[in-house]
Amino acid sequence: MPFPTHIVAAGGFVEDGEGNVLLVKTRDGGWVYPGGQVEVGENLINALVREIKEESGIDTTVSYLIGVYSNTGIFKWYDGVTEVPTQVMFDFVCKPIGGELAVSEETTESRWVPKDMVLDFITHPAIRTRFQAYLEFNGGVNYMEYVTNPEFVIKHQIGISR
């Protein structure tokens, strides 16, 4: 029996203590909160700290888990050729502990954005939905299953009031 293939990823809502959240502008997907794939042999926390640093230049500590998400759709990457497998994503709240805003091979801009203005930047429906869940976080970890292609559709959710 072959083992299933999934992408495991972590995302971080980095709060600066002054009402701002860290956003990065990706080369392919517009504005998002930082995060990315967990590499082989890496745990979620180390992966998230690494991804935030790589994408934004900011050093962080991870505070707590707020959501688990499954994108169960299989679709083509931005190149139109590469097939993206299903994904399991964990969203955490994080705190900055140092570093300077920077860009990377994956990002063209990074900035602190007032929390109440973040949705003016984020256009991707899944990222907007996950950010809204962060804004509405009430202490319980949320779970949501969705697909993003051909259109964004929420298939199942627990703990998220809508």
Image (tube, rainbow, N blue to C red):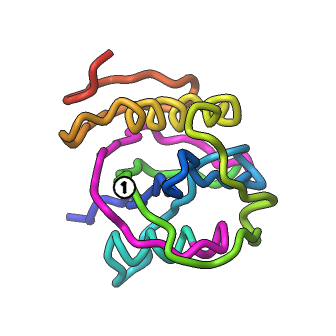
Spot occupied by residue 16 in the image (x, y as percentages of width and height) = 53, 58
Residue at the spot x=81%, y=60% of the render?
108
Quadrant containing the N terminus in the rendered view: bottom left
Spot occupied by residue 125 in the image (x, y as percentages of width and height) = 56, 28
Other residues around mark 1 within 10 Å, as few (<14) / some (14–19) / many (≥20): many
Q: Is residue 30 or residue 147 the one in the foreground? A: 30
**Which of the 4 quarters of the picture holds residue 142?**
top left
Quadrant containing the C terminus in the rendered view: top left
Residue 84 shown left or right of residue 114 in the figure = left
Residue at the spot x=69%, y=51% of the render?
81
- In the image, is residue 122 above or below residue 102? above
Residue at the spot x=63%, y=78% of the render?
99
Q: Residue furthest front?
A: 18
Is residue 35 located in the magenta-colored stretch of the structure?
Answer: no
Judging by the rendered image, the residue that carries numbered circle 1 is 92
**Which of the 4 quarters of the picture holds residue 98?**
bottom right
Residue span colored magenta: 53-80
Residue at the spot x=44%, y=64% of the render?
95
Residue 77 shown left or right of residue 19 in the figure = right
